[in-house]
Amino acid sequence: MKLRLALLASLALSGCTVGPNYSEPKLPTPATFAEADGPQTTPNLQGWWQAYRDPELDRLIAMGLADNPDLKSAAARIRGARAQVRVARSAYFPQVNASAGTNYQQFSKNAGLSSLASLLGGGGGGSAGESSGSPSGVAVPGDDITVYSAGFDTSWELDLFGGTRRSVQGARARAEAAIWSARDAQLSLIAEIVDAYLQLRTLQAREQVAHEEVGRQEKRLAILDHTAQSGLTPEGDFIRQRAQLAQAQAAVAPILAEGKAQMHSLGTLVGRTPDTLIAELTAASPPLPAPPQVPAGLPSDLLRRRPDVRMAERQLAAATADVGVAVADLYPRFTLTGGAQLISTALGNLFTGDSLQLTGAAQAMFPILDWGKRKGQVAQRKAQADEAYYAYQKTVLTALRDVEDALIRIRSEQERNHALQGGLADATRASRVVEARYASGLVDYGVVLDARASEISAHDALIQSDGALRRDTLALTKALGGGWEGLPLPSVPPRL
């Protein structure tokens, strides 16, 4: 009857899981984004970079997803987190070990019983397993003995209060957090590659305009040189023009240097040395199309789509489970141990029923006095869970802010871009009018070059605005958490 009651009590306790149960926090979010214009549909961001229809960009992203070191590190973290789940789950089951061995011992002849042994006819050497000098098989001083053994031992700590279950919950949450961390790494990598590539193409377009400005200044210098030699222009005007030419030439070098830096960055992002892509990225490429229109969607959808938000939520779940692990340490621990061994002084009869030796034990450990250690650990885990909650809250707020910032930047840059387009159109028409007047002999060529200067300046400003608009659109896409959908998880075989 007592045994039955003990078993029933154990079964009842086996369903007890101490510590807080986790539920995903519901943080308040606005119904719509304040900076969004009009109704916002759910964005489809899978493969969004393909909207630029640039094979080189597609190839760079494919290379980065395959060989970027950060993604390989993320894959290793996933493997490690999944292995930790297996480690945590192993505590559910008994731990079984096999052992085998032999033990030899020779007893001193000068032991206290040596005189008694000689009176009884004992003494002499030999192995107890091989008919030693002791006819009774009992070793006495001066004898030696060899013992052979083989068997199994097992130990099992009962998870009566759910410490193991909480540990498994925490390990699984951390494994899921590692997966979302890898998704976030993919999103960041794609955004960095696209950003560097867009900056490079903008710089290359500006380089062409800068060379046009150098050519304009050279033509003007040649005219002033001719008129100065003829005495029609003061020499000071020629010197000032030569200084302006030097400034135009000097403006090209920083653009070239920044372009090379972007090439180096792209090489590193795709897992190559910085100089690998210089030759192919220097080649001329067709102009990039206008950036795609990206709807913002609903703020509530953002929390499910952003990998960093999902990762922070899983880290909060893991920290909550850790509280349960610490609380379980406040309760008693019950451990069952047992062993089955074959022990014999002769190898020939080791594997017989007479050599079997069984042991079994049950142990209970009740925490009584630890001077606040366990309660301190519970308080520490609760504080860490609070920290994880506030980190999650901050991640959500940052995600909302990122989208709002990107939306307002896009809208303001679109307005600026529209104005710059009008300015370039006016400058181009003015330049054509002046060229017609020059062809009619109404103005000299210097007026044509001045009009051309305004057109070049307006063109450069519009190129920079186009680049800023593409980067702002990229920032919105990243803020919305898109790009990882449809991609396989980072995977790389173990290095060792």
Image (cartoon, grey):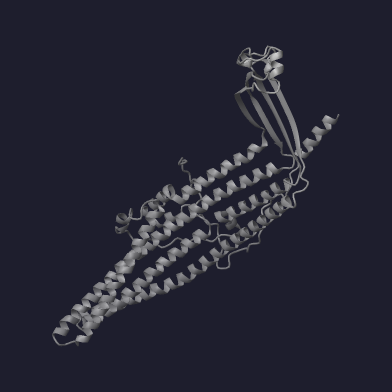
Q: In the rendered image of this protein, does residue 469 appear above or below residue 275?
A: below
**What residue is at 68 percent from the left and 45 percent from the top?**
166
The front one of 248 and 408 is 248
The front one of 11 and 217 is 11
From the top left corner, tell me how far across and down residue 247 is, in percent: 29, 76
From the top left corner, tell me how far across and down residue 141 is, in percent: 67, 20
Q: In the rendered image of this protein, does residue 420 appear above or below residue 331?
A: below
Q: In the rendered image of this protein, does residue 374 appear above or below residue 479?
A: above
Say left or right for 247 vs 226: right
From the top left corner, tell me how far across and down residue 34 is, in percent: 58, 68
- The quadrant holding residue 342 is top right
Q: Is residue 443 in view? A: no
**What residue is at 62 percent from the left and 23 percent from the top?**
105
The front one of 130 and 55 is 130
Q: In the rendered image of this protein, does residue 38 appear above or below residue 73?
A: below
Q: Quadrant of the N terminus?
A: top right
From the top left corner, tell me how far across and down residue 311 is, in percent: 58, 53
- The quadrant holding residue 401 is bottom right
Q: Residue furthest left?
A: 230
Say left or right for 278 vs 491: left
